[in-house]
Image (cartoon, rainbow, N blue to C red):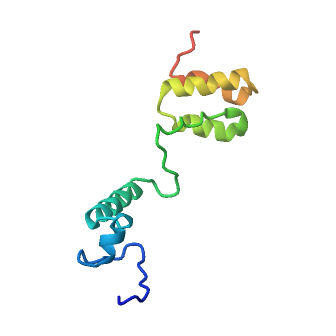
Amino acid sequence: MNGSPRVYSGGQLVDEKDPVLRTHGHLFEDADTHVAARTARAAEMATAVPGEARTLGAPPPPLRYDPGADNVKDVLARLAGVADLDERRRILDAEAEGQARAGILKHRGDLLGEVDPE
């Protein structure tokens, strides 16, 4: 005051009777607006899964499992853990079209619940 410089920092509360608001009020944000914006940012940050970036659109589709990237033992273990029959069939079809390893394909009937006709 009295001609001496004053410094204001972001987030600082300024009394509504402060003379600076008469001449430079357009540079200051209303307290309610500031609090609402901080609350919205906090809510947005809380919705993100730790370690993952937030996106505005739908998340990208999950990568499809490629049996060719694993050895026979790992592929069979993966197939045993897949509950969805269509996904098991997709993995087995990918194996048949790819490396076509007998150690995997010989279990196709068991993994898909198919009975071999004799």
| Number of disc labels | 0
Percent position (x, y) of residue 42?
36, 61
Judge by depth and name the residue closer to the eye, 12 or 114.
12
Percent position (x, y) of residue 65?
62, 35
Percent position (x, y) of residue 30?
29, 65
Left or right for 56, reference 76: left
Q: Residue at x 59, y 9 (%)?
A: 118
Q: Residue furthest top?
A: 118
Judge by depth and name the residue closer to the eye, 37 or 79.
37
Q: Where, quadrant-wise, is the N terminus in this rendering?
A: bottom left
Q: Residue at x 32, y 64 (%)?
A: 34
> Measured along the vertical axis of the image, is residue 8 above or below residue 49?
below
Q: Residue at x 53, y 16 (%)?
A: 115
Judge by depth and name the residue closer to the eye, 24 or 96.
24
Percent position (x, y) of residue 45?
41, 58
Q: Residue furthest left?
A: 17
Judge by depth and name the residue closer to the eye, 54 or 75.
54
Where, by quadrant of the figure, is residue 89 drawn? top right
Q: Residue furthest front?
A: 3
Left or right for 98, reference 84: right
> Measured along the vertical axis of the image, is residue 49 above or below residue 100?
below
> Measured along the vertical axis of the image, is residue 29 above or below residue 95?
below
